[in-house]
Amino acid sequence: MVNRMNDFEKEKTDIAWRKVKARLQAEELLECTSQENHTPNYSITKRSLAVGLSIAAMIAIMFVMNNLFFADGKDSNIAMLEQVNSQESSLVTTLADGSIVYLGKDGKLEYPEEFLSDTRNVNLKGDAFFEVAKNRKKPFIITTPDVTIEVLGTSFSITKSDKFPFMLNVRSGKVKVVDRKTNEVVYVEKGESVSLSSGHLTSFVSKENPMKAFVKEFRFKDQSLKVIVGVLNSLSADDKIELEGDIDSRKLTVAFSGEQIDQMAKLIGLALDLNIDKNNNTIYLSDK
């Protein structure tokens, strides 16, 4: 893997220098003389060297900025997974630490298969709602194109609009937000929001339910029954689903749109051909 990365970086470097060379030739800053074998021999004047270095620096900066977003949250030794949502309904993903992410339309989430380092790093482009599992010893860090977000265990939404390239609404806990361009830091808590506008982070009180838009319509893609039921139970204040027997690992792709949890349980039972029983506030799913 390291060799492939080195080859990739070498190719990028070669492309950058070819651009510098073409620019120097176009501006007649690169002198060309012919050798006996008729192969061109290029020499660089002091002036052309200075110009070339300036151009090279600009290209290098552009290359770094172009790749900075996904470099921040990556460890080259950790396998990274990616979820992309092209549909209107939220795509629900459960991470290795138990954190739940509702990814909005046109959203892109990159995360490790396992959180092996001292921090839990993920990358996000687009809208999402996070329910972060609490772990005081291992901060959860989200890198977006505009800000870096750090939490220990909380729930909040991240959205963008024509008016605000970034907005965060806190449902529970405390969130640290850092502007990646200015390093401005803002802390927001439950019932508060922070937005990015005109290059500044601004916090304010908000009565909006940040989760509402993400659970109106949501779906699971090839997720285990254990993960699906865990998410559904977290959304229900009354009835809960309980799995009986060895059915936890069964995979399912399913979508929900406004159903109550008992209706969701029936959909799961029909899809996987399971028995459905209810006792008081508990719905039991088991093999037939």
Image: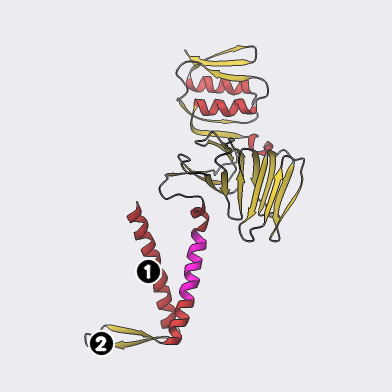
Q: Tell me, yes or no, if residue 76 can be seen here.
A: yes
Above/below status of 183 relative to 13: above
The residue to which callout 1 is attached is 14
Q: Give the image location of residue 107, x and y in percent.
A: 57, 46
- Please give left or right for residue 279 compared with residue 204 in the image: left
Q: Which residues are magenta?
A: 55-67
Question: Mark 2 near mark 1, Cβ–Cβ under 8 Å?
Answer: no
Question: Quadrant of residue 154 in the image?
Answer: top right
Question: What residue lies at 63% left-to-right and 58% top-to-bottom?
Answer: 183
Q: Identify the image's colour scheme: rainbow, by chain, secondary structure or one colour.
A: secondary structure
Q: Nearer the viewer, residue 33 or 58?
A: 58
Tag on residue 35? Answer: 2
Give, as a three-letter code, the residue at label 1: Asp
Q: Give the image location of residue 21, x and y in percent.
A: 40, 78
Q: Nearer the viewer, residue 117 or 272?
A: 117
Question: What residue lies at 65% left-to-right and 48% top-to-bottom?
Answer: 176
Q: Tell me, yes or no, if residue 28 can be seen here.
A: no
Q: Give the image location of residue 165, x and y in percent.
A: 66, 54
Q: Is residue 64 magenta?
A: yes
Magenta span: predominant SS is helix
Above/below status of 266 relative to 182: above
Q: Is residue 71 magenta?
A: no
Question: Quadrant of residue 234 in the image?
Answer: top right
Q: Give the image location of residue 48, x and y in percent.
A: 44, 84
